Image: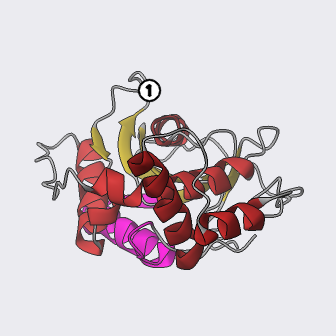
Amino acid sequence: MEINEQLIQAITRAVVAQLQNGSAQPVESKEAVSTTQSLAGKTRMRPKRSYAGSTKARQGTDPKEVVIGVGAAFQTEINKTIGGIPLDDVLRNVKAGIEEEGMVSRIVKVLDTSDVGFMALQAAKLSGSGIGIGIQSKGTTVIHQKDLYPLSNLELFPQAPLMDLDTYRKIGRNAAKYVKGEKVTPIECTNDPMVRAKFQVKAALMHIIETEQLDPAMGMIEWEGIR
């Protein structure tokens, strides 16, 4: 199924119209009916990708290493964040931030969870330094440390629609500073209470696409320079 802005807008307007109607009954607008018909009989948002033959992610030993764990749909089914930033550019800037602090990066694709906190923790456990970064395909990002609880991360960046490339570069720098044991200043992020409502439908669709691509049997695979 092709997920585009027109479909997202149609679903959003249909949901809003139903809420405004104050009823659980369907809103019989032409747009809502058209949207429902386009979803009828569909069981998946995207075809299931096979990672058979891929190289399983190895345990790192380099104390300067920061592992970046990306989502199951990253750079394959999804190529831009929820805010429209190309994922190639996101990775390029995160890696640049890490390298600017004298550390090294490695990218793995996480195929057994779509929860960004667990993605980041698994990346941290795989990292030679014990520090990892998790990035969902929609752009939500977490910096984690291997000996912390899943929800007790070092830094969380939940409002992906408001993030820019400079923020992703700073995330890389901060992750590297945690490795070096330096004092880290939390990254200031723009906050907008209306973002959740504005992007809720698109975020849900992107999360569904990500979750559908999970392959728990594969766990994590090496992803550097792979498509």
Name the residue located 58 percent from the left edge and 65 percent from the top edge.
29
Name the residue located 43 percent from the left edge and 48 percent from the top edge.
21
Secondary structure state at the residue bearing disc 1: loop
| Residue segment shown in magenta | 82-105
Q: Is residue 183 magenta?
A: no
Residue neighbourhood size for the residue with mark 1, other residues' Cα within 10 Å, grouped as few (<14), some (14–19), many (≥20): some
Can residue 64 be seen from the camera position used here?
Answer: no
Query: Up-down: is 96 above or below 59?
Result: below
Q: Where residue 167 sits: x, y (%)?
A: 24, 65
Can residue 43 be seen from the camera position used here?
Answer: yes
Q: Where residue 168 sits: x, y (%)?
A: 31, 64
Q: Where residue 50 sits: x, y (%)?
A: 86, 59
Q: Quadrant of the N terminus?
A: bottom right
- Circle 1 is placed at which residue position? 150
Q: Where residue 2 sits: x, y (%)?
A: 70, 74
Q: Quadrant of the C terminus?
A: bottom right
Name the residue located 69 percent from the left edge and 39 percent from the top edge.
112
Q: Nearer the viewer, residue 84 or 201?
A: 201
Residue 136 left/right relative to 171:
right
